[in-house]
Amino acid sequence: MTVWQQWFCIALGMIGAMTLAWRWQRRRANAGIVDVVWALGMGAAALLIAATGAGSLAARLALALMAGVWSLRLAWHLWRRVRAGEDGRYRALREHWQGHQGKFFGLFMFQAGLVMLFCLPFLAAGASPAQGWPVALALLIWLAALSGEVIADRQLDHFRDNPTHRGLTCRVGLWRYSRHPNYFFEWCHWFAYVALGWGSPLAWLSWLGPVLMYVFLRWISGIPFTEQQALRTRGDDYRDYQRRTPAFFPWFPKS
């Protein structure tokens, strides 16, 4: 397949998948499924590119492994939350939109478009001739970032599982040094595809991963929405956390 054919197949697949996800949301009033399908869609896009790309076997196998494992872990983590009920961010959006399904459909199609955008670094990796040290470096970055994200998620889940912590902000472990360590390591993970795209004719696309992910996490769909919900549910405790703890890049908290 050419790069354009790969991208067209991903677009068609995501439009179909997000339409089905929107119908699922409509029946169950739980828009959190959009995040699960986004994560699975990213993994499916990577596997398609790895199977049909023109790059080296080593680069394509690394792409399939890294994006596949990352996608499944993230989707499972998000699905556990979806099963517990609609996330507060989506509940607030549902109230604001008064349940307007046309707007929710637009949201789901927007997420389909994001898969098409964020899979561009995968296209660079799938066309890469990289072997040896670039592949090893990519795997090392991926493993370190994924480990950090898993640790951050588990620390937060463990904190939330304790009923005495209701209404309080997690400040333990990695959460002492960053208000969003999971987002930080998610961002770091995208540098693995920069390394994997070494020598690719589309290498410049690989840089879109960390650049776009930082923009979205820092200013669009990550930190702003998460912190709005945190302020609604935790109030002054979270405001104190905001004053003391860096938003994204880990650093020592203010006394």
Image: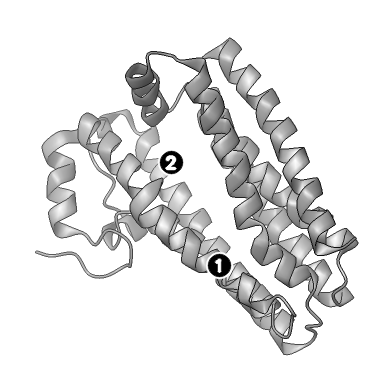
Q: Is residue 84 visible?
A: no
Relative placement, left or right, of 102 versus 91 is right
Q: Which amino acid, mark 2?
A: Asp
- Which residue is at the front of the view, 153 or 2? 2
Relative placement, left or right, of 221 versus 149 is left
Counting residues from the start of the chain, the first of labels 1 and 2 encountered is 2
Q: Secondary structure at mark 2?
A: helix
Q: Which residue is mark 2?
A: 157
- Which residue is at the front of the view, 13 or 69? 13
Picture quadrant where residue 152 is located: bottom left
Identify whether 77 is placed above or below 171.
above
Please identify the residue farthest to the top as the structure is shown.
Answer: 27
Q: Which residue is found at the position 65% from the left and 50% from the top?
A: 116
Q: Which residue is found at the position 64% from the left and 36% from the top?
A: 37
Identify whether 99 is placed above or below 249.
above
Q: Which residue is mark 1?
A: 208
Q: Which amino acid, mark 1?
A: Leu
Q: Is residue 244 visible?
A: yes
Q: Label 2 crowding class (10 Å Cα cut-off): few <14, some 14-19, many 20+? A: few
